[in-house]
């Protein structure tokens, strides 16, 4: 399946979660999320958990935590 993190398409395995997508996108950004400097959001800007399920075609953004 393909999901998008900051508009970059990523091919992932079925059963992957948001954390898997972010880790494939960037290990440094994954660490920033774990240390609470950044957060993953959906298209409406709602924060999401790294354990959240993903679906083919989903779009996520990583933004600085406010």
Image (spheres, rainbow, N blue to C red):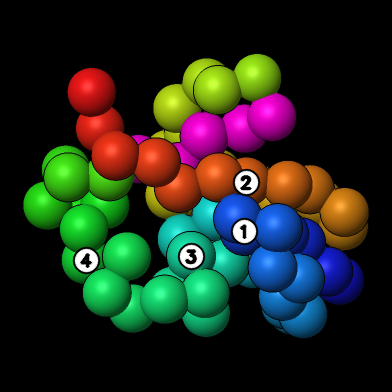
Check whether the beta carbons of the residues at disc 3 and disc 4 lie within 8 A of each other.
no
Which comes before the other along the chain, label 1 or label 4?
A: 1
Which comes before the other along the chain, label 4 or label 2?
A: 4
Q: CA distance from mark 3 to mark 4?
A: 10 Å
Return the residue at label 3.
Answer: 22
Which comes before the other along the chain, label 1 or label 3?
A: 1
Q: Please, is residue 21 above or below residue 46 in the view? A: below
Return the residue at label 4.
Answer: 31
Which one is in front, 57 or 66?
Answer: 66
Give coordinates of residue 25: x percent, y percent.
52, 74
Q: Residue at x 76, y 71 (%)?
A: 9
- The part of the chain drawn in magenta is 39-43
Categorize mark 3 by other alpha carbons within 10 Å: few (<14), some (14-19), many (20+): many
Q: Please, is residue 33 above or below residue 20 in the view? A: above
Q: Is residue 34 left or right of residue 29?
A: left
Q: CA distance from mark 1 to mark 3?
A: 7 Å
Give coordinates of residue 66: x percent, y percent.
23, 23
Q: Is residue 31 visible?
A: yes
């Amino acid at each position: 399946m393909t999901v998008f993190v900051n508009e970059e398409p990523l091919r992932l395995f079925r059963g992957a979660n948001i954390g898997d997508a972010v880790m494939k996108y960037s290990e440094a950004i994954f660490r920033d999320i774990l240390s609470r400097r950044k957060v993953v959001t959906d298209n409406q800007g709602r924060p999401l958990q790294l354990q959240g399920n993903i679906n083919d075609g989903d779009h996520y953004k990583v933004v600085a935590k406010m």
